Image (cartoon, helix red, strand yellow):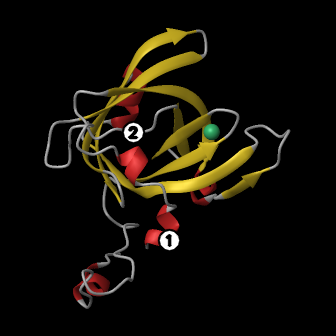
Amino acid sequence: MSLDNYRNKRNFNKTPEPKGFAKQPNTHTFVIQKHAASHLHYDFRLELNGVLKSWAIPKGPCLDSNVKRLAMHVEDHPIEYGSFEGIIPKGQYGGGTVMLWDQGIWVPLDPNPTKAYLKGHLHFELQGTKLHGTWDLIRFKKEGKAESWLLKKSDDNFSSPLLDYDIIKRETNSVVILH
Ligand code: MN
């Protein structure tokens, strides 16, 4: 099955309809949820082997290729969690507002993303609404079950110095209303 016919009939610069990404080979969904829990953070989730591998990024992603953002590895989430936006009641785990900040697909640039993940270094391209270009997610510390990783933008057409453009400050809306 291919979406070629569907896509050929439409000019996606002129129609708000989705381009669709379900059938592109070797792609996976990704999502970033802005989570105003007791401490604000951005949950970065990459679909891999039927689950959403998840990292909590306190400061959120940064387009500056000289800036590394701490990403605490957290438990796998179900794929369906990637479309969740809403309020987790106070007193419940993660209580607070969850907003879909970005979503799209990630394209692994490693031949075997599962191996790369286990080795602690994923290299990939993001095709989201807000985030694009190539990125690295690198594990630098492992203490028991706690893993600390870093998210870093590669230097490319989509990178930009933090002083010129702070995407976390500029992009504050839900990605859902941008479509
Ligand atoms: Mn969270």
Kindly identify which residue carries mark 2.
61
Q: Is mark 2 within 8 Å of ligand 1?
A: no
**Which one is in front, 47 or 135?**
135
Marks 2 and 1, how far apart at CA: 20 Å
Q: Which residue is farthest bottom?
A: 9
State the image coordinates of residue 88 (x, y, percent, origin top left).
76, 49
* Callout 2 amino acid: Pro
Task: Ligand 1: give its quadrant.
Answer: top right
Label 2, secondary structure: give it: loop
- The image quadrant that residue 4 belongs to is bottom left
Dot 1 alpha-carbon crowd within 10 angstroms: few under 14, some 14 to 19, many 20 or more: few
Picture coordinates of residue 177 (x, y %)?
A: 50, 71
Quadrant where the N terminus is found in the figure: bottom left
Quadrant housing the C terminus: bottom left
Is residue 31 placed above or below 21 in the rendered structure? above
Q: Which mark is residue 177?
A: 1
| Residue at image coords 50%, 11% | 142
Name the one closer to the observer, 87 or 20.
Answer: 87
Residue at figure coordinates x 32%, y 87% from the top left: 15
Between 113 and 91, the one lying in front of the other is 91
Task: From this view, report whether residue 117 is shown above or below residue 91.
Answer: above
Residue at figure coordinates x 31%, y 63% from the top left: 24
Q: Secondary structure at mark 1?
A: helix
Q: Position of residue 47 (x, y in %)?
A: 47, 47
